[in-house]
Image (cartoon, rainbow, N blue to C red):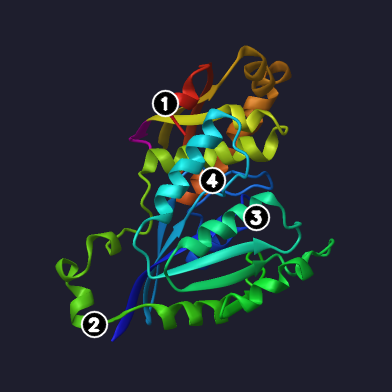
Amino acid sequence: MIKIGKVLLVGRANVGKSTFVNNVIGQKVAITSPKPQTTRFSIRALYEEERGKIIFVDTPGIVGKAKDYLSKRINEKTLQVLNESVDLVIYMVDATRKRDFEESKVLGLVRKINRPKILVINKIDDPGKSFLPQYKFLEEEFKDVFQISAINNMHVGPLLDKIFEYLPSISVEAAADKEKIPPDLVYPLLNLDSKIFLGELIREKIFLMMGEEIPYTTTVMVDQILERKNGITYIKARILTTNDRYKGMLIGKDGRKIKEIGSYARKEIALAINKKVFLDLTIEVDPHWQEMYY
């Protein structure tokens, strides 16, 4: 017998859910940055080993007061995912951040999910100030509590052991027959198509390299991926932003900033796909992109 099931990760923005999934899977499937709400839509990724398969559903972090159109849509999509059928819920909190209205909102949503739950307290190895005492009361509410460091894989092994305990068992023969497995448990390594995934890698570099305001006014659309005869992968992509002022900041003096973003993104993509890459990156102004895209 092996275990197969779906695990939902829920938490505030920037608590480390995407970092956790990336490190468990062993490769990047979700972009990360120190800025909140880097992830904009749910990502399903497959973890597989001899004990079985785990479909991790990484949700965008919930924002307590969503003021702009994009934040409201992200919250709405996250709430839709919370209603999915799952076998286990991981509620992740950040030990380095105070409990506030936003955290209370997330906890209220988690309490309404009628599935087994594990409380995971992340960033316990952070040398800065800890607000761990503010989360102690949760240990009375959750049967299973783990303190981890997702970025350093600290105590992640015991957490995986507990996750597998909760998942339903299935025979090896049945697991080999995809027709006998519910459709929502049959996934490739990642549920995103290649254009979205590459666009996310580029957008991550904008989050990491630009100021506080710029990343939330931008998205990335990958229009073309071509395998050239010389072995180089050609990728044509556009950064969309909401006005000319942001476009100028993304371009930078003498075009230095866009070149820098493109260079870092190209190296990351080449590493991800293990091929040489030519990245054709441009910037366009579209005040309404948030109404159409994430």
Q: Nearer the viewer, residue 279 or 34?
A: 34
- In the rendered image, residue 242 lying in the magenta stretch gets the answer no
Q: Which residues are magenta?
A: 224-230
Comes first in the chain, label 3 or label 2: 3
What kind of residue is marked 4?
A: Thr
Quadrant of the image occupied by residue 193:
top left
Which residue is under mark 1?
292
- Residue sitting at the far bottom: 1
Q: Nearer the N terminus, badge 2 or badge 4? A: 4
Mark 1 or mark 3: name the one nearer the start of the chain.
3
Contact? badges 1 and 3 (CB < 8 Å): no
Identify the residue position indicated by label 4 in the image. 39
> Dot 3 corresponds to which residue?
103
What residue would you read off at disc 2? Answer: 172
Indicate whether residue 229 is drawn in magenta: yes
Q: In the rendering, at what x and y percent does residue 230 appear? A: 38, 36
Instruction: Give the residue drawn at x 45%, y 49%.
Output: 79
Question: For numbered disc 2, what is the local secondary structure?
Answer: helix
The residue under the point 64% across, 56% down is 104
Q: Earlier in the sequence, mark 4 or mark 3?
A: 4
Where the N terminus falls, by quadrant? bottom left
- First in residue order: circle 1 vs circle 2: 2
Marks 1 and 4, the one that precedes in the sequence: 4
- Marks 4/3: CA–CA distance: 18 Å
